[in-house]
């Protein structure tokens, strides 16, 4: 089998451009949504399994959503060598607006769908409602993440630290 020679120019990666603003914002939104969803789902499962009322279940879900969202952002920052305080500060700045919007939208939808909050864990209504609520919440947070990143804030600041050791952005 004939393989053409590899030219040095084809191995030069310096010509790559940065991802588009929309792509970066979408990536940040999916990242936030993942962290938010982990806490939200855990809170909904715990509250529902324990037979808690809507208020207690939502409160637990919101707290866990913020904790897991911040933790997902902090992990790579801590691995890059940042101190806990610096990583926490960056995670707070990057995620607070996005997770807040997601939680407001997500929980409002769960409350608006008849029977969703009262459905048991084995019922499709619970899971379908939660999945729909999370998707809509992510869509609602996208423009905010895009706006923040366009201004060098939010996940734009966090991304400067990814893949670097000793806490120095590139």
Image: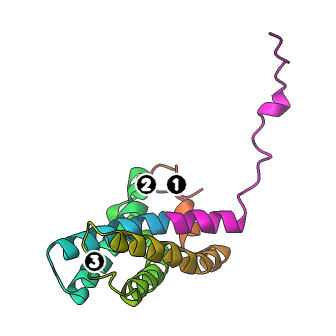
Asked if 86 appears above or below 61 in the picture, the reply is: above
Outermost top residue: 1
Answer with mark 2 or mark 3, whichever residue precedes in sequence.
Answer: 2
Q: Nearer the viewer, residue 121 or 71?
A: 121
Q: CA distance from mark 1 to mark 3?
A: 41 Å
- Left or right relative to 107: residue 10: right
Residue receiving disc 2: 76
Residue 44 % position (x, y)? 28, 74
Q: Give the secondary structure at mark 2.
A: helix
Query: Would you name the residue on which mark 1 appears?
Result: 162
Q: Residue at horizontal 76%, vertical 48%? A: 16
Q: Is residue 86 visible?
A: no
Circle number at residue 119: 3
Q: Is residue 79 magenta?
A: no
Rounded to the nearest angstrom, the CA distance separating label 2 from label 3 is 37 Å
Q: Which residues are magenta?
A: 1-30
Instruction: Tell me, yes or no, whether the two marked residues, 1 and 2, touch with CB atoms within 8 Å.
Output: yes
Across and down, in percent, residue 152 comes to 63, 73
Q: Secondary structure at mark 3?
A: loop
| Of residues 22 and 96, the one drawn nearer to the viewer in this rendering | 22
Q: Residues within 10 Å of mark 1 (few under 14, many from 20)?
A: some
């Amino acid at each position: 089998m004939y393989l053409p020679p590899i030219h040095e120019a084809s191995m030069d990666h310096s010509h790559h451009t940065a991802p588009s603003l929309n792509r970066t914002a979408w990536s940040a939104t999916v990242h936030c949504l993942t962290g938010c969803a982990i806490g939200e789902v855990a809170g909904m499962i715990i509250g529902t399994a324990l037979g808690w009322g809507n208020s207690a279940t939502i409160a637990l879900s919101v707290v866990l959503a913020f904790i897991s969202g911040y933790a997902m952002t902090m992990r790579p920052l801590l691995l890059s060598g940042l101190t806990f305080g610096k990583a926490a500060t960056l995670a707070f700045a990057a995620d607070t607006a996005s997770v807040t919007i997601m939680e407001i939208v997500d929980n409002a939808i769960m409350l608006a769908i008849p029977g969703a909050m009262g459905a048991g864990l084995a019922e499709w209504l619970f899971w379908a409602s939660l999945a729909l609520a999370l998707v809509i919440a992510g869509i609602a947070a996208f423009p905010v993440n895009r706006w923040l990143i366009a201004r060098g804030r939010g996940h734009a600041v966090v991304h400067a630290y990814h893949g670097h050791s000793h806490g120095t952005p590139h």
